[in-house]
């Protein structure tokens, strides 16, 4: 079914908020301190409550809150399947997407190398030479000279 240019999602979930959930949602909406997305989701759930005298259909909610029927249905589905907390609050990442390759320990070794005497035959350290030596000494599997530069810039060290 198409309404206002949007494909209408199927009407699958009936929302009946508990008194506690309703109070929490009203608190979010009334205070207005939460992110806009959280407030929108709270409004959608409040308007979707079958027990409320202000109950609205999916298309009415979408129109009233300037969103799509699909968004309304997604919020309703999430509430029914995952509960209030998962629907309202954005899930925080438990770990970064990729663990940092260069740890503080590696940085300390690079800085110590840069502050020390250059190898025999060289008058000073170069970025590439520091990168090679860091790998040779087994501090890290591989590292680029650009990363070495970044490490030294953070500590305001210069190779000149």
Image (cartoon, rainbow, N blue to C red):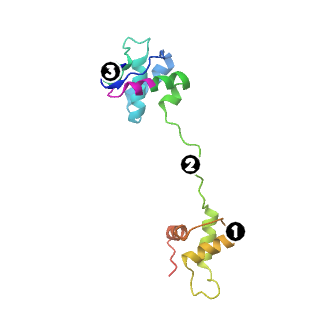
Which label number is shown at residue 33?
A: none
Q: Give the range drawn in magenta.
A: 65-73
- Whether 28 is drawn above or below 104: the answer is above
Labelled disc at residue 138 = 1
Place residue 28 in its image quadrant. top left
The mark nearer the N terminus, 2 or 3, is 3
Front position in the image: 116 or 137: 137
Circles 3 and 1, Cβ within 8 Å, touching? The answer is no
- Marks 1 and 2: CB-CB under 8 Å? no
Determine which quarter of the picture holds residue 119: bottom right
Residue ID for mark 3: 3
Q: Nearer the viewer, mark 3 or mark 1?
A: 3
- In magenta segment, residue 109: no
- Residue 71 highlighted magenta (yes or no): yes
| Residue farthest to the right, as pictured | 138
* Label 2 vs label 3, nearer the camera: 3
Give the crowd class for mark 2: few <14, some 14-19, many >=20 residues within 10 Å: few
Q: Position of residue 26 (x, y in %)?
A: 42, 23
- Kindly state the secondary structure of the residue where label 1 is placed: loop
Q: Mark 2 points at which residue?
A: 97
Q: Is mark 2 on a helix, strand or loop?
A: loop
Residue 44 appears at what percent x and percent y? 40, 23
Please provide percent x and percent y for residue 58: 38, 19
| Label 2, label 3: how far apart the Cα atoms are | 39 Å
Residue at x 62% of width, y 68% of height: 108
Name the image quarter holding residue 42.
top left
Q: Within 10 Å of the Cα at label 3, are there few (<14), some (14-19), or many (20+) other Cα atoms?
A: few
């Amino acid at each position: 079914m198409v309404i206002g240019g949007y494909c209408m999602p199927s009407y699958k979930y009936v929302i009946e908020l508990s008194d506690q959930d309703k109070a929490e949602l009203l608190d979010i909406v009334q205070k207005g301190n939460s992110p806009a997305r959280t407030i929108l989701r709270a409004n959608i759930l409040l308007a979707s409550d079958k027990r409320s005298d202000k109950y609205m259909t999916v298309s009415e909610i979408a129109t009233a809150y300037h969103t799509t029927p699909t968004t309304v249905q997604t919020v309703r589905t999430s509430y029914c399947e995952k509960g209030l907390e998962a629907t309202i609050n954005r899930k925080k990442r438990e770990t970064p997407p990729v663990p940092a390759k260069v740890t503080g320990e590696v940085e300390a070794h690079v800085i110590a190398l840069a502050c020390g005497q250059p190898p025999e035959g060289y008058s000073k350290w170069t970025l590439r030479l520091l990168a090679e030596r860091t790998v040779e000494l087994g501090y890290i599997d591989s590292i680029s000279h650009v990363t070495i530069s970044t490490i030294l810039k953070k500590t305001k060290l210069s190779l000149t």
